[in-house]
Image: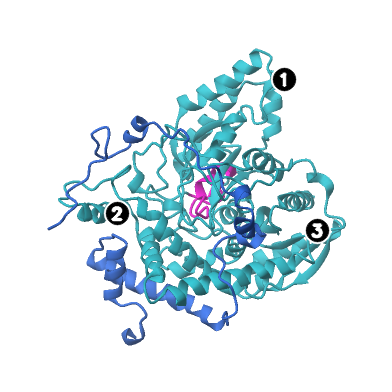
């Protein structure tokens, strides 16, 4: 039933573009099928009336730790001090392309 | 062919070294040999570093020969899931995009194990970026369940569970985002621990979904698992979400039993979709805990059926953001011969990511995109609160909650790999605790007629791992009877 599908081929291409993914044509149609199957399943969340429910973004707020952020900033935020970090040489060892100081990348401006 | 869990324990190894009955080197060589014999069939390890392991063992033997006190995990052979960094060793996260990468730093949980004298044998296979419930999504090939090589070990920490089950490590570390420690522990017949969110530092863990990811141990028994958690838990300035609460000694009260405890059994976890053999085994275990003195109380966690859809919206949204860092610039794979930066990003990510990772990035990007954010992401976060509130309410009247860990025993390799929704449902009983941030453990609770392990999940309040371990230990006692 293509006319009731939540995700069209065009949607798949759009989110692939947003997520910097390059999909082969056969991947595009498989992803369309899978995303629709998953979102059909997710649609049951609509059965719940959540108008009065605060979204829960993380666990700390459930434990009351989030309130501390407003009231006792000093106790939860670390001091903003300069501390040693990883030596540049050890990080640059992993770089696909580097001059030893910077990461090198292909041309940034496309036209 | 069945390979059984080794009877060796953490204290057994440390004591044997201290008494001069063996050396750390001899113990390590024994495990390295076992890996060589067994792992061609199981494929739990992605890398084994013999020289690294033997050098660590030698340090322990030196301490012993100099008459020094041995650290708590002295000479204990361990291995870690390949999403955790150990300086100088590979860390692939089961992905081609990190092939050849060797992190320049060590994860806090791993460092704590090393400081406690553990010997690292190698890095363990897992689903790519910990995304999967069967370990079939590893870019380096599936792991086979030691109890039946045609079946999956569960996922995503399949290698971590299988290595302990096959006696190739005494304990391992895994990670759990929606069930990735508990479900493979159930499938492989070992103990797997989901610590409370914030109990163990995530520094040095390659992130999947940051509001859900947790690091936890696998072991052959509750005592060893509790020992490992005592070592790796605690506050870490490198992880702002790690809790400053003090870490109790989790082994101190293990044997106090369940008399006087109230244990909740939620109706929603025993409904349609639960394999009858699993149901029978778990109900049998619950009955034995009642006989051991626990009060068993029926409870309801009414929003349970909405956990999987809420989880797959939240986890994929967070994943689409976390996985943006894999761009071919700073580490890992870079697609060759791209003439612009944009092309390089797209081609690198196309070459480097497998199908399930792409599927989740696409889904996560979709649910966060303009016009869909409120309908999916915000909605899922609201349902997350309802699920958490279910647990908070239940824990006012019970000390812990008993459920099956997974709806079935280990399924066959290939059985669900073409149907993402069917695969996601393998986590139906585990994602709830992930979303609520509470702690839990999967403990072996009998076997199916085919000899496949069945795990009971024991869930506890935030930061109440001690109670969960106590119930787990009591279950081990009554199951062994």
**CA separation, marks 3 and 2?**
50 Å
As drawn, the label of residue B289 is 3
Q: In the rendered image of this protein, does residue B115 appear above or below residue B339?
A: above
What residue did someone put label 1 on? Answer: B19
Few, some or many C-alpha atoms within 10 Å of disc 2 (few <14, some 14-19, many ≥20)? many
Relative depth, front residue between A88 and B222: A88
**Direction top: furthest residue:** B66
Q: Is residue B258 left or right of residue A109?
A: right
Count every numbered label the image shows and give the total. Answer: 3
Q: Is residue A96 magenta?
A: no
Whether residue B190 is visible to the viewer of this picture, yes or no, is no
The span shown in magenta is B144-166
Q: In the rendered image of this protein, does residue B216 appear above or below residue B407?
A: above
Q: Residue at x 54, y 39 (%)?
A: B108
Q: Colour of chain A?
A: blue
Q: Is residue B97 left or right of residue B226?
A: left
Whether residue A3 is visible to the viewer of this picture, yes or no, is yes
Q: In the rendered image of this protein, does residue B481 appear above or below residue B299?
A: above
Where residue B349 sits: x, y (%)?
A: 29, 54
Query: Which secondary structure, mark 2?
Result: helix
Tell me which label, 1 or 3, sits earlier in the chain. 1
Q: In the rendered image of this protein, does residue B11 appear above or below residue B323?
A: above
Where residue B269 sits: x, y (%)?
A: 66, 70
What residue did someone put label 2 on? Answer: B349
Chain letter of disc 3? B
Asked if both marks, 1 and 2, belong to the same chain, the answer given is yes
Q: Colour of chain B?
A: cyan
Asked if both marks, 3 and 2, belong to the same chain, the answer given is yes
Tell me which label, 3 or 2, sits earlier in the chain. 3
Quadrant in the rendering for residue B395: bottom right
């Amino acid at each position: 039933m293509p006319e009731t599908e939540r995700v069209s081929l065009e949607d798949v291409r759009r989110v692939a573009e947003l997520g910097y993914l390059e999909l082969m044509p056969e991947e595009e149609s498989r992803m369309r099928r899978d995303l629709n199957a998953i979102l059909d399943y997710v649609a049951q969340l609509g059965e719940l009336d959540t108008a009065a429910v605060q979204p829960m973004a993380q666990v700390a707020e459930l434990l009351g730790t989030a309130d501390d952020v407003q009231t006792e900033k000093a106790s939860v935020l670390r001091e903003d001090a300069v501390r040693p970090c990883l030596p540049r040489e050890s990080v640059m060892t992993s770089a696909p392309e580097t001059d030893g100081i910077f990461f090198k990348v292909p041309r940034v401006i496309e036209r | 062919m069945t390979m059984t869990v080794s009877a060796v324990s953490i204290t057994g190894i440390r004591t044997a070294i201290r008494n001069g009955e063996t050396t750390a080197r001899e113990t390590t060589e024994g495990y390295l040999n076992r890996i060589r014999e067994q792992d061609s069939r199981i494929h739990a390890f992605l890398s084994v570093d013999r020289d690294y392991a033997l050098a660590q063992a030698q340090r322990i033997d030196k301490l012993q020969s100099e008459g020094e006190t041995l650290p708590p995990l002295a000479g204990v052979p361990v291995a870690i899931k390949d999403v955790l960094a150990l300086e100088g060793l590979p860390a692939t996260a089961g992905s081609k995009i990190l092939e050849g990468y060797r992190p320049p730093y060590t994860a806090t949980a791993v460092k704590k194990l090393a400081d406690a004298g553990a010997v690292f044998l190698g890095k363990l296979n897992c689903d790519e970026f910990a995304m999967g419930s069967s370990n079939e999504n590893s870019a380096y090939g599936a792991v086979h369940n030691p109890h039946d090589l045609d079946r999956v070990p569960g996922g995503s920490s399949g290698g971590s569970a299988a290595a302990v089950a096959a006696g190739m490590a005494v304990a391992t570390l895994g990670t759990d985002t929606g069930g990735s420690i508990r479900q493979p522990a159930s499938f492989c017949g070992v103990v797997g621990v989901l610590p409370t969110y914030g109990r163990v530092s995530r520094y040095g863990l390659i992130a999947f979904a940051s509001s859900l990811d947790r690091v936890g141990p696998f072991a052959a028994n509750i005592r060893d698992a509790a020992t490992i958690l005592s070592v790796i838990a605690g506050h870490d300035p490198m992880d702002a979400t790690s809790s400053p609460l003090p870490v109790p000694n989790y082994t101190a009260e293990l044997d106090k039993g369940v008399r006087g405890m109230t244990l909740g059994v939620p109706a929603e976890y025993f409904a349609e979709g639960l394999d009858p053999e699993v149901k029978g085994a778990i109900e049998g275990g619950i009955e034995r805990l009642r006989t051991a003195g626990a009060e068993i109380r029926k409870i309801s966690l009414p929003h349970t059926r909405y956990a999987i859809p809420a989880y797959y919206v939240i986890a994929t949204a967070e994943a689409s953001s976390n996985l943006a860092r894999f761009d071919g610039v700073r580490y890992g794979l870079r697609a060759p011969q791209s003439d612009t930066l944009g092309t390089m990003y797209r081609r690198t990510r196309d070459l480097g990511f497998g199908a399930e990772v792409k599927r989740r990035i696409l889904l996560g990007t979709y649910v966060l995109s303009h016009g869909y954010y409120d309908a999916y992401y915000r909605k899922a976060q609201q349902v997350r609160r309802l699920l958490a509130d279910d647990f908070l309410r239940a824990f006012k009247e019970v000390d812990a909650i008993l459920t099956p860990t997974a709806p079935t025993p280990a399924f066959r390799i290939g059985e669900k790999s073409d149907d993402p929704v069917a695969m996601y449902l393998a986590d139906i009983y585990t994602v709830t605790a992930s979303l609520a941030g509470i702690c839990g453990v999967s403990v072996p609770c009998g076997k199916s007629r085919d000899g496949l392990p069945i795990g009971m999940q024991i869930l506890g309040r935030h930061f109440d791992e001690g109670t969960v371990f106590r119930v787990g230990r009591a279950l081990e006692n009554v199951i062994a009877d």
